[in-house]
Image (cartoon, rainbow, N blue to C red):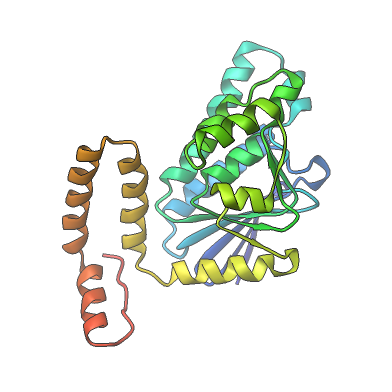
Amino acid sequence: MLLTANTDILLRRDEADVAWLTLNRPAARNALSIGLMQALDAELAAIATDASVRVVVIGAAGPAFCAGHDLREIRAEARREAYEALFALCSQLMLRIVHLPKPVIARVHGMATAAGCQLVASCDLAVASENARFATPGVDIGLFCSTPMVALTRVIGRKPAMHMLLTGEPADAQTAYALGLVNQVVPEAALDDTVAALAAKIAAKSPLTLAIGKQAFYRQAELPLEQAYAYASEVMVRNMLAHDAEEGIDAFLQKRTPVWSGT
């Protein structure tokens, strides 16, 4: 097990092919300050080329997952240029997660609001504790959650997304599960073990196959149906020609455990 810390506001623990990243601003309910977003973005960029990591988990310390952007920091720099830089950085971070060639799991407890809800929606998978809550409450303070909307509307239906965006009302964990925002809801005491088991199951797959599949998943989702099938067919051919596909098929036929080379 490797224990590291980029900064005090972002912690990292590597264990069994999984990098556990922890938002560590508990007193601020892990609000996404510029420093925290920069640290998380930099760590994910490093992980992208780190062959020892196959899966990433993003969690948080303290009573909440993430309260969204740091409003005090925002009000301290009330200039167009500052706002433009802030939301460009936020968009860069969310895209980093989507484009990362490794699956990312959100480990959610407590509140995930505004950009915190966006962070959950941007991750490939999410496991929530029973006490988790999700909201896009910007409308309550005169600030529509436009950037969280981008991620949210790509994982849940339009009507429930609009309800969250227009009312600011929080959704509990079971509602988030029913909407497709999270994959599992478990007791808080079982959260870490559940996430670890899910991460381990995914980490046991071919890293090349995971990278190919994740990229293809997001790209085809934005294409018209015929183009999506044409693109997916090309991906299947490329995947079939990879050594790991040959090894996986042979291992299945020979009833043995495959040995992945990542090629």
Q: Residue at x 57, y 22 (%)?
A: 85
- Rendered location of residue 194, percent (x, y): 61, 69
Q: Residue furthest bottom?
A: 255
In terms of depth relative to the viewer, which is nearer, 112 or 32? Answer: 112
In terms of depth relative to the viewer, which is nearer, 243 or 216? Answer: 216
Pick the quarter of the image with the N terminus: bottom right
In the rendered structure, the answer to whether residue 160 lies left or right of residue 96 reads right
In the rendered structure, the answer to whether residue 54 lies left or right of residue 244 reads right
Vertical side of 250 occupied by 191: above or below: above
Q: Residue at x 45, y 67 (%)?
A: 202
Count the marks: how many?
0
In the rendered structure, the answer to whether residue 136 lies left or right of residue 210 reads right
Q: Quadrant of residue 253?
A: bottom left
In terms of depth relative to the viewer, which is nearer, 153 or 75? Answer: 153
- Rendered location of residue 256, percent (x, y): 30, 87
Q: Residue furthest right?
A: 27
Q: Residue at x 59, y 46 (%)?
A: 120
Residue 82 shows in the view: yes
Q: Residue at x 32, y 78 (%)?
A: 259
- Rendered location of residue 261, percent (x, y): 30, 71
Q: Quadrant of residue 130?
A: bottom right
- Rendered location of residue 170, percent (x, y): 72, 39
In the rendered structure, the answer to whether residue 99 lies left or right of residue 235 reads right
Vertical side of 56 occupied by 91: above or below: above
Pick the quarter of the image with the C terminus: bottom left
Residue 22 shows in the view: no
Q: Residue furthest top?
A: 80
